[in-house]
Image (tube, rainbow, N blue to C red):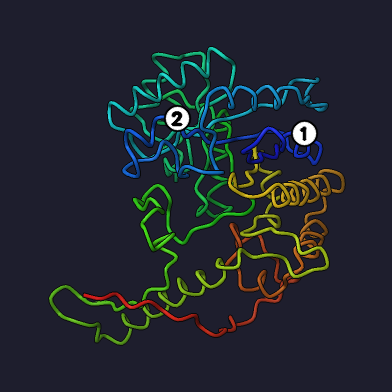
Amino acid sequence: MKILAPLSDVEEVSALAHAGADEFFCGLFPNGWFERWGRAGWPNRRGPGPANIEHLDELARLADAVHAQRDKEAGGNHLPLFVAMNQQYYSDEQAEFLLDQARCIAERGAADAVIVTDPGFIRLLRRELPQLPIFASTVTVALNAESVLFLRELGCERVILSRHLHLEEVAQLQAAVPDVQLEVFLLNDNCYFEEGFCSTAHALPGFGVYCMTPWEFEVTMDGEGLLEDSEEKKRWDFLIEEHLELQRSLSHRGYGQGATSLPLGPCGLCAIPELMDMGIHSGKIVGREAGLYRKLRSVQAVRYARDLYHDNRDATETKSKALELRGDPRGCADGFFCYYRSARERSLVDMPSRARGPRPPRRKVSK
């Protein structure tokens, strides 16, 4: 399984490659986009700033730095760089603008693949730039084999799976479409919601990330006021409490509590043995906007678990070492940081009833 690492600067490449990264990805926020379309629609799922490259010359330099790194396990081939153009959809003008960018990228060899969501844009790229490989973003929400097959027919060589699939579902997908590269999430970013169904731009003035604002919730039935049915009310109370608990957990990004305090964030380290056995192609470390330290420690953590299982083929020992590395037994027990909760073993992780900590103040919606 390849380790896919985020990039935002040429200076990060050598350190991350030596730490164990096998592949890299970055985002493109082209110069001139914001002046034309502002906040109404970003070219990818991150806004302008440290998460993105702005100029094609800078992207070309980044690609040169990545390509200068060689994969000793793959006959000395250069390491690849993938570029995200993965907003949910584009207007015709935006698609033509990005097509011109992609054409320049292909001509200059500034990327080995582009990561795309919009099916219309995928078809446009395939028709105009057939030599440029395309990966289907997680924002395509490929939740079953038929959706993966559809994306393959559009021309996608790789499909990045949703964070919300269970290991059993990932295994079924891999068995159903063995000729398509599948990529999964391993570290550093999570969301209560499915990203492909989300229209929030994370750019509302005064709110930051809208869905992470601690709102006060009241559930009503259409035309009937507040819920009165006790069973239905219990169900909604549970769902809301789970959501608020996830907010509290993600607010400190899940930094490890061990001696090393590894900045792991949301995590799939325990699932690495299962993912490797399935034949998953790549494990993704999220965080283009993060500092180099966080990226380095994340790559090192994934490499540690991957190489350990590769050498000993002992899933239980690998999971145990991953838990030690994380150094946060309560966080692992709660499971809010887990991409793949079914990978946890009760013999290794004590999973009692979830303890409730003090709640942060909630912001009440004014009507």
Estimate how packed mark 1 is, as few (under 14), some (14 to 19) or many (20 or more) residues with alpha carbons within 10 Å: some
Dot 1: what SS?
helix
- Are the two marked residues, 1 and 2, in contact with CB atoms closer than 8 angstroms? no
Q: Left or right? Give the position of 99 relative to 26.
A: left
Q: Left or right? Give the position of 16 relative to 36.
A: right
Q: Is residue 159 above or below residue 143?
A: above
Identified at 43% across, 60% down, the residue is 208
Q: Is residue 224 above or below residue 159?
A: below
Q: Is residue 86 above or below residue 164?
A: above
Estimate how packed mark 2 is, as few (under 14), some (14 to 19) or many (20 or more) residues with alpha carbons within 10 Å: few
Dot 2: what SS?
loop
* Quadrant of the image occupied by residue 228: bottom left
Numbered tag placed on residue 31 in the rendering? 2
Amino acid type at mark 1 = Ser
Q: Residue 51: horizontal and vertical position, in percent?
A: 55, 43
Residue position for label 1: 14
The residue nearer to you, when weighing 3 against 340, is 3
* Quadrant of the image occupied by residue 87: top left
Q: Residue 177: horizontal and vertical position, in percent?
A: 53, 33
Amino acid type at mark 2 = Asn
Identified at 68% across, 50% down, the residue is 274
Q: Nearer the viewer, mark 1 or mark 2?
A: 2
